[in-house]
Amino acid sequence: MGESNIDSIKKKWSLEGMTALVTGGSKGIGYAIVEELAQLGASVYTCSRNEAQLNEALNQWATKGYIVTGSVCDLASRAHREELITRIHSHFNGKLNILVNNVGTNIMKETLEFTEEDFSFLLSTNLESAFHISQLSHPLLKASGVGSIIFLSSVAGVVSINVGSIYGATKGAITQLTKNLACEWAKDNIRTNCVAPGLIRTPLAELHIKDEKLLNSFITRTPIGRIGEAGEVSSLVAFLCMPAASYINGQIICPDGGLTVNCID
């Protein structure tokens, strides 16, 4: 007996039975993504540098009945990245459907104030870690038969935003990496897309939100007239991982309330 139309639709809009790795999932947008993927039926593995935050998040998800596992990992370290993927290989029996490269950070300074150490730290955390994790995950994504990579970038990688030139450069590199992998790895049934949010209410964005002048400049440039919430980003990430999004590849999508299409400065 064939699959009913209702069953087919449910499968199209579900992540049931899929496996996912979300980096930096203990807080902010990462936390929201882990929770949304788990709500939709995926088995999720996440990581964080902060063991206390990670354990608290894991306990919260366990209480809600979600299938989420995690470990402590500093993705700025090559050795830690390799160890993480070894754990993922074992945990998911060599197959991974979804990779969400969420980890990222920022140092807000004027360009002339940046040091060599600042540059290296932002580059290794925001760009090198995502590139290397994607490399290491490729065999697992290919083995799953249906793989999806989502990079978390920023509107700062699409337009000029006064949050630091190095941060913007790393996020711009992520958007280009998305396009290259989308073309290179499509033959392996791996789709690659990028979500580039505007200002979202997260712990990382607290400094921007507390700075009234900076906050107002964002809101003024945003047609919707407010900052975003983490759940408004996680829902887009989840959609891009679904069978319903099977023909979406190589796209840079900005959940930003219209900021990047507004010419008003």
Image (cartoon, rainbow, N blue to C red):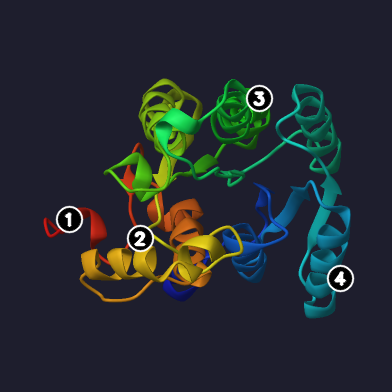
Q: Secondary structure at mark 4?
A: helix
Asked where in the image residue 184 lies, by quadrant, the reply is top left
Q: Is residue 1 visible?
A: no
Determine which residue is flagged by label 1. Answer: 261
In the image, which disc is placed on residue 209?
A: none
| Relative horizontal placement of residue 121, taking residue 248 as reference (left or right) | right
Which residue is depicted at the point 58% across and 45% down? 105
- Which amino acid, by three-letter code, is at mark 4? Asn
Which residue is depicted at the point 37% across and 62% down? 214
Classed neighbour count for the residue bearing mark 1: other residues with Cα under 10 Å, few (<14), some (14–19), many (≥20): few
In the image, which disc is placed on residue 255?
A: 2
Classed neighbour count for the residue bearing mark 3: other residues with Cα under 10 Å, few (<14), some (14–19), many (≥20): some
x, y percent for residue 86: 83, 30
Which residue is depicted at the point 79% across and 46% down? 49
Q: In the rendered structure, which disc, 2 or 3, sits on the residue that comes first in sequence?
A: 3
- Which amino acid, by three-letter code, is at mark 1? Val
Asked where in the image residue 165 lies, by quadrant, the reply is top left
Which residue is depicted at the point 77% across and 37% down? 74
For the residues labelled 3 and 1, the Cα–Cα distance comes to 37 Å
| Relative horizontal placement of residue 263, taking residue 250 as reference (left or right) | left
For the residues labelled 1 and 2, the Cα–Cα distance comes to 11 Å
For the residues labelled 2 and 3, the Cα–Cα distance comes to 30 Å
| Circle 2/circle 3 CB separation < 8 Å | no
In the image, which disc is placed on residue 59?
A: 4
x, y percent for residue 87: 85, 36
In the image, which disc is placed on residue 139?
A: 3
Q: In the rendered structure, which disc, 2 or 4, sits on the residue that comes first in sequence?
A: 4
